[in-house]
Image (cartoon, coloured by chain):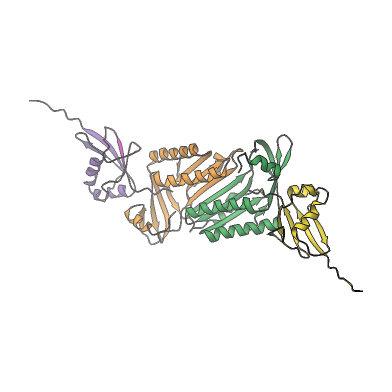
Chain colours: A green, B yellow, C orange, D purple
């Protein structure tokens, strides 16, 4: 399955990919477009990616999780234009052990944020636009809550 | 009189996010007259119009793998210059 | 919202209850009826509860999570006859901070298992039946993986 | 000759899971002739047919709150005898 999608993310599909009668515990994480960022009102986002590297790195991350814990992982990141409330990223980890499910799910989302080449342009209510993660946004983010 | 054979080297450079906006393009080819490193290719990029907005040592990927400033480039390489990541 | 339900659990409904434009991170846990328990093939379960106490304790647990972390939590446990693959319990925790979402989700499922008066009768492929958590099942569970 | 006024005490006992099966019922009333604790009520339950399958100190709830063996019972209390929990 490819990691990047331009279509809305359906958690049910991701669950179906990893659910099995032997796996009784399923941990999931959804990253949703918030209406605020660093104290500014957000109206929308535009995600772009270095697609072949994003696919390779996300595969790597899933393999790491599946070898480190007894889990099956599914993972999807949306790119293109998103609105507030849209799901940007979804991780599902299914296991016979709920500890493994939680740990793997957490690991995957942290690594996606750290290692996958994806960029986010934010559109604000005041009409301004900013690349999040660029120098300026990082400056603001230091003092702000962030997902 | 001896003849010197000069082998040139062309690499494909990819730009993303704010860097693509800075240089007003998402890709370009750079040709060098001899052996060159990632850092030297970056110096060339930073000399282009808008290139001053690239940091001296951005995150770089060479053929989909993270690269160091000293990594040597070879003919046909794909060098991607990556702004700070913001996925998730 | 009541904690106990006899109907199939719909994760989408639980998500809708806590999702909001200000909460960008949603952690969930689903407990699914597995096809094995302590090495035996399971064909189905029957969950029963001390309903008024289960409702009170689950409310307490949700309140604890919501006061300890910046989260909104929704929680549902199914009772009655369940088949392999059915969702027995679902927890959703939504927050502006993904750390809070994960921690609250984990806290709630652990506390539900520890404190809520619910009992599980397991039906095995060999025709036998056992109350899980009773002396005999506990004996077996010590050496077995369990969700 | 003096008259002794005896005040009796009735509590509702609820049984669940394997304990309900052991005593073949989910609820019963127990009446006592005077002050009584949770532990004493349990002793009475354990003397009933099937009651030997209840442990001496099971998890108990008195009016929806976890109770100790020494907790006193009052008229109209609801005493629930809880097998090991198995939710989730």
Marker count (numbered) = 0
Which residue appears farthest toward the bottom when viewing the image? B1
| Quarter of the rendering containing residue D79 | top left
Query: x and y percent of residue B73 in the render?
Result: 75, 63
- From which residue to which does the magenta span run? D64-88
Can see residue C66? Answer: yes
Query: x and y percent of residue D54 in the render?
Result: 27, 48
Please determine whether, in this image, residue A91 is positioned above or below residue B32. above
Q: Is residue D39 left or right of residue B14?
A: left
Q: Main secondary structure of the magenta part?
A: loop
Which residue appears farthest toward the right when viewing the image? B1
Q: Is residue D65 left or right of residue A108?
A: left
Question: Residue at the spot x=78%, y=52% of the render?
Answer: B26
Can see residue C91? Answer: no
The residue closer to the viewer here, A30 or B13, is B13
Query: x and y percent of residue C118 in the render?
Result: 39, 46
The residue closer to the viewer here, A37 or A6, is A37
Q: Is residue D78 magenta?
A: yes
Q: Is residue D69 magenta?
A: yes
Q: Is residue A71 left or right of residue A119?
A: left
Please determine whether, in this image, residue C120 is positioned above or below residue C20. below
Which residue appears farthest toward the front when viewing the image? B1
Question: Residue at the spot x=40%, y=46% of the render?
Answer: C114
Question: Residue at the spot x=72%, y=61% of the render?
Answer: B71
The residue closer to the viewer here, A40 or C32, is A40
Q: Is residue A69 left or right of residue A43?
A: left
Query: x and y percent of residue C39 in the render?
Result: 41, 61
């Amino acid at each position: 399955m490819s990691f990047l999608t331009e279509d809305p993310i359906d958690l049910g599909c991701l669950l179906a990919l990893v659910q099995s009668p032997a796996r009784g515990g399923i941990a999931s994480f959804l990253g949703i477009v918030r209406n605020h960022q660093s104290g500014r009102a957000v109206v929308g986002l535009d995600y772009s990616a270095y697609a072949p590297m994003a696919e390779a790195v996300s595969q790597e991350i899933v393999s790491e999780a599946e070898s480190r814990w007894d889990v099956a992982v599914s993972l999807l990141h949306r790119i293109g234009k998103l609105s507030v409330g849209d799901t940007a990223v979804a991780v599902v980890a299914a296991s016979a052990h709920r500890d493994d499910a939680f740990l793997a799910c957490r690991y995957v989302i942290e690594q996606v944020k750290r290692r996958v080449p994806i960029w986010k342009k934010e559109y604000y209510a005041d009409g301004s636009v900013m690349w999040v993660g660029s120098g300026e946004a990082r400056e603001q983010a230091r003092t702000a809550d962030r997902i | 009189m001896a003849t010197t054979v000069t082998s040139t080297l062309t690499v494909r450079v990819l730009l993303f996010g704010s860097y693509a906006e800075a240089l007003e393009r998402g890709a370009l080819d750079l040709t060098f007259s001899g052996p060159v490193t990632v850092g030297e290719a970056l110096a060339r990029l930073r000399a282009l119009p808008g290139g001053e907005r690239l940091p001296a040592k951005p995150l770089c990927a060479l053929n989909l793998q993270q690269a160091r400033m000293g990594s040597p480039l070879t003919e046909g390489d794909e060098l991607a210059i990556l702004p700070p990541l913001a996925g998730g």
